[in-house]
Amino acid sequence: MVPFDRLIQIMDGWAADHPAEAVFAQIGTGRYEPRAMEFSRILSPQDFAERVASCSLVVAHAGMGSVISAAQAAKPIVLFPRRQSLREHNTDHQLDTVKWLADRPGIYVATDEVQIREQIARARRESVSAAPLSATAPASFAQRIRRAIIEL
């Protein structure tokens, strides 16, 4: 699991400021070890799904696995994209992901510590779950693919 120390440090600070809140993080191989929140370096897929199902809010990098997990569990999610310029990823595709998802119900986007804190407060206040995801593509998309194949 790719570490994301910047997010873990921010969330550890948030946890320190909110000691009554139970906060848990999967931190991967990062160098930073949280002091104010419970953590595990890695979780099995089943343990991860159980953690998501039992939480009230997910805060995560902007990977689609995180988005899908939150949506499947009907949990709001605050997305914090990794940045190529900070060597957190090899591309800035997560910035594109948050632009694409920003207007969806239950998805909150933050790009710095102030915004994470604001978006956590907003998500907790609004209590809107991420919109459910379909296991299949919309019919209009399937039709476009079908037409493209036929035209070949």
Image: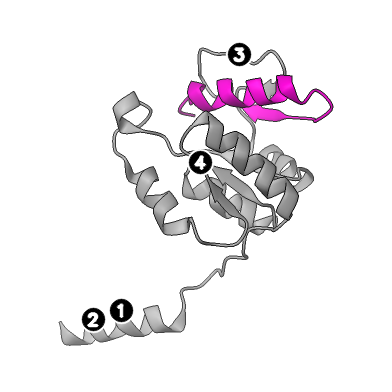
In the depicted view, which residue is nearer to us: 33 or 111? Answer: 111
Q: Secondary structure at mark 4?
A: loop
Question: As displayed, is residue 94 above or below residue 127?
Answer: above
Residue at numbered disc 4: 110
**Residue 49 position by quadrant:** top right
Residue at numbered disc 1: 145
Residue at numbered disc 2: 149
Contact between labelled residues 3 and 2, with CB atoms less than 8 Å apart:
no
Q: Is residue 77 magenta?
A: no
Contact between labelled residues 1 and 2, with CB atoms less than 8 Å apart:
yes
Label 2 or label 3, whichever lies nearer to me, is 3
Q: Callout 4: few (<14), some (14-19), or many (20+) C-alpha neighbours within 10 Å?
A: many
Q: Is residue 20 magenta?
A: yes
Residue at numbered disc 3: 33
- Which of pointers 4 and 1 lies earlier in the amino acid sequence? 4
Question: As displayed, is residue 46 above or below residue 142?
Answer: above
Q: Secondary structure at mark 3?
A: loop
